[in-house]
Image (cartoon, grey):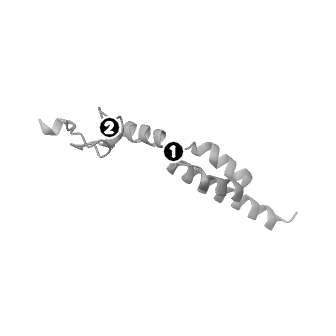
Amino acid sequence: MSSEFLIGAALSAVVFAIACGVLAHRKGRDPGMWAFGGSILGIFAFGYLLFVPRDEEELKRRQIAQGNARECPHCKDAIPRNATACRSCGRDVEPVRTAADY
């Protein structure tokens, strides 16, 4: 095999690994596993990942863990941290108070 072919194969593996990892993260999937799969399977893993549905529960857990959202006490959906009403169930919720509010 020529060195140009090996360099091209290695670069495409890196590109597909990064692309699959980023797309998997945005869909709430394991980016490490998908990056590995993308480096091995390339365009096939990326194409399959395009049709994999988003994991809404994982995305909700991430938002709450990062502090960007909180759980509605009524319907358990993720709502913005400073929301006064839930966009899913429409019920009023207590706003989150921070140290700056006191």
- The x and y percentages for residue 53 are 55, 49
* Residue 95 in the figure: left or right of residue 36: left
* Residue 77 in the figure: left or right of residue 20: left
- The x and y percentages for residue 42 are 71, 56
Residue 96 figure quarter: top left
Q: Residue at x 37, y 38 (%)?
A: 64
Residue to which mark 1 is pinned: 28
- The x and y percentages for residue 85 are 23, 43
- The x and y percentages for residue 52 are 59, 50
* Residue 50 in the figure: left or right of residue 72: right
Q: Is residue 12 above or below residue 66?
A: below
Q: Quadrant of the N terminus?
A: bottom right
Q: Residues within 10 Å of mark 2 (few under 14, many from 20)?
A: many
Residue to which mark 2 is pinned: 70
Q: Name the element at disc 2.
A: strand
Q: Name the element at disc 1.
A: loop
Q: Is residue 83 above or below residue 9?
A: above
Which residue in the rendered view is the most extreme toward the right? 1
* Residue 101 in the figure: left or right of residue 50: left
The amino acid on which the numbered mark 2 sits, given as a three-letter code, is Arg
- Compare marks 2 and 1 and give the one earlier in the sequence: 1
Q: Quadrant of the C terminus?
A: top left
Look at the numbered discs 2 and 1 and tell me whether their residues touch, using CB distance below 8 Å.
no
Front in this rendered view, residue 15 or 3: 15
The amino acid on which the numbered mark 1 sits, given as a three-letter code, is Gly
Q: Residue at x 29, y 46 (%)?
A: 87
Q: Is residue 31 above or below residue 12?
A: above
Q: Residue at x 60, y 54 (%)?
A: 51
Give how far apart the Cα atoms at labels 2 and 1 are. 17 Å
Which residue in the rendered view is the most extreme toward the top? 73
Q: Residues within 10 Å of mark 1 (few under 14, many from 20)?
A: some
